[in-house]
Image (cartoon, rainbow, N blue to C red):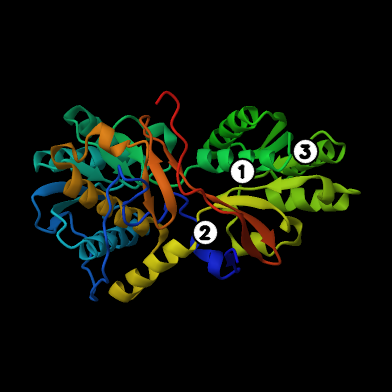
């Protein structure tokens, strides 16, 4: 029996698309580190302060947090710290000292925090969360040869030595397009938000469709104007129902997929001929419950892994973790595993970009030389207010081109 996520159960997947529970840094093959976990002890962690340390090992790693940034960033920073503490509790013998710095959620703060971390001997930086802080921190870390595992999903900040650690729109687009092609879909259309996210998703979709031998027949983009969205919906729906596309990708988590689905349902034979395709942003009870999206497909990690992490986190800290907490947990476990196995090469370029990758609670992942990543995703089908896996996430990756 393949997993079924109910409207309630799939809630953990909502928002924070950057967060992906990769816990453990366990090997995807014999070439990658393996770490065994034992149960965490209880107790509450303290609120992050501007500078302090966690652990007492010989290998120094920095954690950059937006502790003093406005809004709820301080609460997120606290959860990131909690997750790091949990990771060290679950890794007996972890030879790490985590140097905690406040990046203030700004470019200037990131630059100052990274400078202080490098000055304190950090060999690896975990974080920051916000793209602005990543830009500032990387200006210091890259010249110093200190790699970063960052929580931002903004691909513009990725680079050699600055590795995005979360789930990316490129991965969603590639997985759903290739799966649809394998199910016989050859002509695609897309309705994308006129944003950076839409541009990234669209470019990746184009590449994946072409690589699968298909054609992206039309791409429509919409802004915040409701009338404009209605016009774009009518355009792609008419194309599809006229036979110009057998699948329509509508990845955003707004009303666009609902309106496309409704337009197809109103057209004679539309839903039976045209497959709706989404992204991880569809993991929202509001969308899953909508009649217009029933039968739609979207990519996402298998949810069971994060559920286990969340239960342990709640037992330790008395509250459910927000999604970014999983990233801090996993980055810490990865750092500990690499330090235990690879000695002086622990954070070297070839170690972090091991083409075999690593396996965590959300499946296989690998960091790419350009700073992006690949992650193992399942394909879900929306059905009766739930999402069930119709194609499991792959357990490993094919060889990288050129290797």
Q: Residue at x 37, y 47 (%)?
A: 28
Q: Quadrant of the N terminus?
A: bottom right
Name the spot of residue 84 as percent of width and height, x first.
25, 59
Q: Position of residue 132 (x, y in %)?
A: 34, 39
In percent of width and height, residue 133 lies at 30, 41
Q: Secondary structure at mark 3?
A: helix
Up/down of 89 relative to 301, above or below: below
Q: Name the mark on residue 14.
A: 2
Q: Nearer the viewer, residue 130 or 41?
A: 41
Please tell me which of labels 2 and 3 falls first in the chain. 2
Q: Which residue is mark 3?
A: 236
Instruction: Report the residue marked by disc 1.
Output: 176
Question: Looking at this view, is 142 or 401 the one in front?
Answer: 401
What crowding class fits label 2: few (fewer than 14 Cα within 10 Å), some (14-19), or many (20 or more)?
Answer: some
Can I make out residue 311 in this image?
yes
Q: CA distance from mark 1 to mark 3?
A: 18 Å
At horizontal 9% and vertical 43% (from top left) the residue drawn is 120
First in residue order: circle 1 vs circle 2: 2
> Mark 1: few, some, or many residues within 10 Å (few <14, many ≥20)?
many
Q: Residue furthest right?
A: 268
Give whichever of discs 1 and 3 has the lower sequence position.
1
Above or below, 115 relative to 81: above
Residue 292 location in percent, x, y?
76, 57
Q: Residue furthest top?
A: 402
Judged by depth in the image, the label closer to the viewer, 1 or 2, is 1
SS at badge 2: loop
Residue 222 placement: quadrant: top right
- Look at the numbered discs 1 and 3 and tell me whether their residues touch, using CB distance below 8 Å: no
Q: Report the Cα–Cα distance between label 2 and label 3.
A: 27 Å
Q: Is residue 204 above or below residue 60?
A: above
**Image point (19%, 31%), residue name:** 145
Judge from the rendering whether residue 161 lies leftward or rightward of residue 184; answer left or right. Answer: left
């Amino acid at each position: 029996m393949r997993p079924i996520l109910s409207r309630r159960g799939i809630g953990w997947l909502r928002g924070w698309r950057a967060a992906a529970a990769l816990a453990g840094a366990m090997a995807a093959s014999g070439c990658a580190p393996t770490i065994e976990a034992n149960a965490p002890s209880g107790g509450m962690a303290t609120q992050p302060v501007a500078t302090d340390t966690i652990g007492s090992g010989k290998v120094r790693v920095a954690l950059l947090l937006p502790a003093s940034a406005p809004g709820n960033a301080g609460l997120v920073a606290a959860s990131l710290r909690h997750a790091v503490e949990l990771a060290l509790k679950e890794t007996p013998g972890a030879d790490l000292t985590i140097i905690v710095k406040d990046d203030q959620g700004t470019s200037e703060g990131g630059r100052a925090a990274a400078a202080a971390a490098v000055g304190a001997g950090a060999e690896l930086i975990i974080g920051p969360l916000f793209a602005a802080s990543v830009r500032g921190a990387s200006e210091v870390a890259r010249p110093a040869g200190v790699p970063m595992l960052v929580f931002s999903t903004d691909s513009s900040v990725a680079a050699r030595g600055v590795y995005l650690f979360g789930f990316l729109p490129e991965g969603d687009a590639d997985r759903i397009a290739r799966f649809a092609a394998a199910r016989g879909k050859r002509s695609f259309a897309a309705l994308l938000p006129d944003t950076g996210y839409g541009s990234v998703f669209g470019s990746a979709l184009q590449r994946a469709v072409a690589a699968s031998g298909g054609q992206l027949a039309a791409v429509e983009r919409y802004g915040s104007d409701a009338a404009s969205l209605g016009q774009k919906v009518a355009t792609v729906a008419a194309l599809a129902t006229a036979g110009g596309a057998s699948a329509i990708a509508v990845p955003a988590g707004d009303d666009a997929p609902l309106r496309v689905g409704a337009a197809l349902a109103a057209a004679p034979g539309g839903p039976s001929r045209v497959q709706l395709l989404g992204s991880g942003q569809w993991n929202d009870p509001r969308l899953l419950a909508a009649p217009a999206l029933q039968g739609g497909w979207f990519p996402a990690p298998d949810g069971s892994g994060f559920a286990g992490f969340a239960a342990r986190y709640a037992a330790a800290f008395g509250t459910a973790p927000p999604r970014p907490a999983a990233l801090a947990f996993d980055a810490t476990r990865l750092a500990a595993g690499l330090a235990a196995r690879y000695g002086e090469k622990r954070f070297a370029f070839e170690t972090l970009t091991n083409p075999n990758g690593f396996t965590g609670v959300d499946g296989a992942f690998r960091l790419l030389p350009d700073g992006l990543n690949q992650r193992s995703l399942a394909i879900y089908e929306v059905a009766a207010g739930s999402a069930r896996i119709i194609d499991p996430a792959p357990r490993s990756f094919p060889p990288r081109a050129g290797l």
